[in-house]
Structure formats: C-alpha cells, structure tokens
Image (cartoon, rainbow, N blue to C red):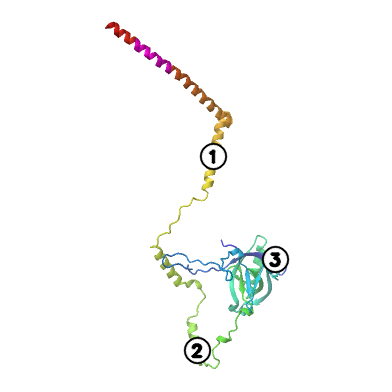
Amino acid sequence: MAQAIWKGAISFGMVTIPIKVYSATEEKDISFRQVHVADGGRIRYKRVCQECGEEVPYSDIGKGYEMADGRMIVLEPDDFADLPLSSKKVIDVLEFVPADQVDPLYLGKSYYLAADGGPGGKPYVLLRDALEGSELYALVKVALRSRESLALLRTHENVLVLQVMLWPDEVRDASFAAPDSDIEIRKQEKAMAESYIDTLRGEFDPDQYHDEYRHALEQVVEAKAAGVPMPETEEEEPEGAEVVDLVAALRASVEAAKARRAGGGSASSAEEPAKKSAPAKKAAAKKAAPAKKAAAKKEPAKKTAAKKTAKKSA
C-alpha cells in the first residue's frame, strides 16, 4: 500500500470531501552510484561552506535567495509562516472547463485521491460520477509541498485524479522554435503525410510498449552481479539479544523464587541452613583429628612390646 503524502479536503461548493493524496506515478529508471573504478568504493560529497571552508551539517543549512546584484538573502522559518497559502490543506474548485481546451503542455505530476474515512465516501462518489462522461475538468487550486499550483480534477478508472499544472508564466513562448513562414507545402505532400498517419492510426494501448533499454541494462547488471562476491560484513549481535538475556534472567529469577517458596522461607532463611551446616562439618573434622593423633600414639607402644618378646625368645 502506498503512503499518503498529503491529507486535506476538496471544497466542492458547500460539500467538503475529506481525501488522501497518493503519488500516481513512479520512476523505473536504473540509478547508478558514483564509484572509484579501482576498488568500487562509493564517492561521497561533503557540504562545505564557500566562505569558511568548514563542513556544514544539515541542521545548519538554511534557505538563501541570491539577488541579481549578488546579495544573499537568508530566510528563516518564520518568514514562511505568514505567507498567503489560502488553499493549504484544501483543494478549492474554481470552475469547470472543457477537457479539450486544456493543452497537455500545462500538465505535470499526477496524484490519486482516496476518500478519507467513511463519511467522505458518498460525496467522493458524487463528484466522481458527476465528472465521469461530462467531458469537463474541475480547475482547482492546491498547495502541495509548500507550493501553490493550479491543477485539474478528473476521473481515471473510478478514481479521482489530481493533475498538477504549470502556471501560465512557467510555459515559455514557443515562437523561437517556429520554422520560417515562407515555407510552402504542396497538396500532394500533405495528402501523402495524412495517408501515412491514417496507416498508423490505432487505439491508445500503452501496455504494448516496453522500456527495452532498461530491460537490457538490468540483464547486464544481473550478469555482472553473478561474478561479484558478496561484500564481507562484520558479524553483529542480532537485534533483541539484550531482550533475550533479560528474559532468561527473569525466568531464572522466577524459578529461584518458586524454589524458595517450596523450601518454606525467604532468600536469607534458605541460605542460613547452608551456613549452619558448614560449621558443623568443620567441628566434626576437628573431632576426627585428635582421634587420629591418639591412634598414632598407640602405634609406638605396640612396637616396644614386639621388641620385648623378641628378646625373650632369644
């Protein structure tokens, strides 16, 4: 599901239609990185101030307007706050114009409009059905990405489409590209050109055409990727390892608590019998030690008795 880039409402007379705006198109071109040919390393660019020569972080970068005389005017966020964006978050319907009067030269990026919430569904369908088959476009004014634009509301596959337009002063004068007016075309030449056009006449079906260059380039990239080893990456601890350790520690704590309860005491009382039994073992060891000494003293007495019997027999 695409992500909405804008939320607002269509002002359709006394009817307000809450909508979400989604980009209707996406670029499919293959993008390349600038790399060092010798080792394939990425080439990165630093943001360096021309005046002081220091690298500037994004947080310190502002907007500046260079005057014709070379002066640089730095604008602050407050300078943009009070600008007259009357159509902010609102798509104002100005009038309805014939579709065949709109030159495609004025058309820009397209956006899908989706009804935002249950209550907005009925007025959305009402405007969509009213435009469908009317051969009219709704001319509107909208502010997208802090820029006010003219736009058209039209239908496409049961969906309302917002088609952003250029302002009239953004369309250049075409007179410089016009050929010389003294060129004459004969009737036979025009007739042959019209005949060729009729031969190639067909229904508009863009699905039958494909970007063959991009497809071939993708195959080249995949073929070269088969011979390029995967980059070596340092082994990192998996995310959540600390959580697993905490869970294990908590589980051990629960088991210890159950064992203490089964023993009928707290942690200190469970440890006390162990402490008491240790001195008892030491005392028993001390008692056993004098007994061994006494046995050792009796052994010499046995040896002297053995000597006396040996003398008598002699």
Precedes in sequence: disc 1 or disc 3? 3
| CA distance separating discs 2 and 1 | 90 Å
x, y percent for residue 114: 62, 64
- Say which residue label 2 marks: 191
- Say which residue label 1 marks: 251
- Say which residue label 3 marks: 16
* Residue type marked 3: Thr
Camera-nearest residue between 11 and 295: 295
Q: What residue span does the magenta drawing correspond to?
A: 292-304
| CA distance separating discs 3 and 2 | 53 Å
x, y percent for residue 218: 44, 67
Q: Which residue is at a point 52% across and 44% down the rendered structure image?
A: 245
| CA distance separating discs 1 and 3 | 56 Å
Q: Which residue is at a point 65% across and 77% down the rendered structure image?
A: 97
x, y percent for residue 112: 60, 67
Q: Which residue is at a point 53% across and 47% down the rendered structure image?
A: 242
Instruction: Say which quadrant the N terminus sits in.
Output: bottom right
Q: Which quadrant would residue 256 be assigned to in this image?
A: top right
Camera-nearest residue between 278 and 21: 278
Front of the two marks 1 and 3: 1
Instruction: Say which quadrant the C terminus sits in.
Output: top left
Q: Is residue 148 visible?
A: no
Precedes in sequence: disc 3 or disc 2? 3
Left or right, 114 with respect to 219, comes to right
x, y percent for residue 14: 73, 68
* Residue type marked 2: Ala
